[in-house]
Amino acid sequence: MSVEPCIIRVTPHEFGQLQKNPEALDEFIDDGYETGAFSFDWSPNAPPTRMLHLDEFAMSLLTGFDDDSPLCRALVGWDSSLLEGASHGHGGAYYHTPERVSEIAEELESLPEAHLRERLESRAENFRLAASGFLDGDEAIRSHQRDHFYRLRSFYREAAGSGDYILLMMV
């Protein structure tokens, strides 16, 4: 069984509603799917979405699950807060405040391209076998991860610009 990150942009009003009624999280997520606010379309011209869902492969290459990088803070949220009473997937729902979202967005924007390239190159070797069924060669692996990174960076930039919270869950 894989464990994958799911992050959702939430307006301050929506966050206030979820704080008052944390059991409504599943209904909130279901409504997002029904209205199209939560989409899995990663194509370059896809409209902005309020949800990002990364596969375990992408998550492992970008973060390693255990480091203190902007990527890990953005996806795993080691420094996030628990949304009391809310759960989804494999545990609790955590959140970043709009202020923290802005800080992480700035960290992602300032992450040097060379750092990202070095990170992906050093980890691609570990995932050749796992990726062989759907990605052919190291450059395809790195390209796949770069696309995830650029989408993540854009996601945080848009959330920061809107003053949104971000919910973090493992599903």
Image (cartoon, helix red, strand yellow):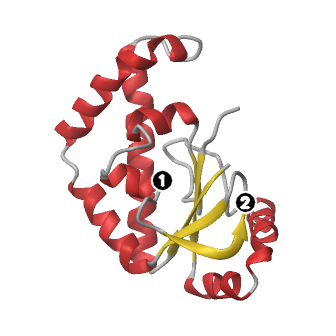
Determine whether the residue tagged by mark 2 lies in a helix, strand or loop.
loop
Residue 154: percent from left, percent from top: 40, 57
Residue sitting at 54 percent across and 41 percent down?
43
Viewer-proximal residue, 43 or 144? Answer: 144
Callouts 1 and 2 close, C-beta under 8 Å: no
Which quadrant would residue 19 be assigned to in this image? bottom right
The amino acid pointed to by label 1 is Val
Viewer-proximal residue, 51 or 88? Answer: 88
The amino acid pointed to by label 2 is His
134 on left or right of 136: right
Which quadrant would residue 83 be assigned to in this image? bottom right
Residue sitting at 37 percent across and 26 percent down?
142
Classify mark 1: residues with Cα within 10 Å, few (<14), some (14-19) or many (20+): many
- Tag of residue 76: 1
Rendered position, 130 above or below 117: above
Disc 2 marks which residue?
Answer: 88
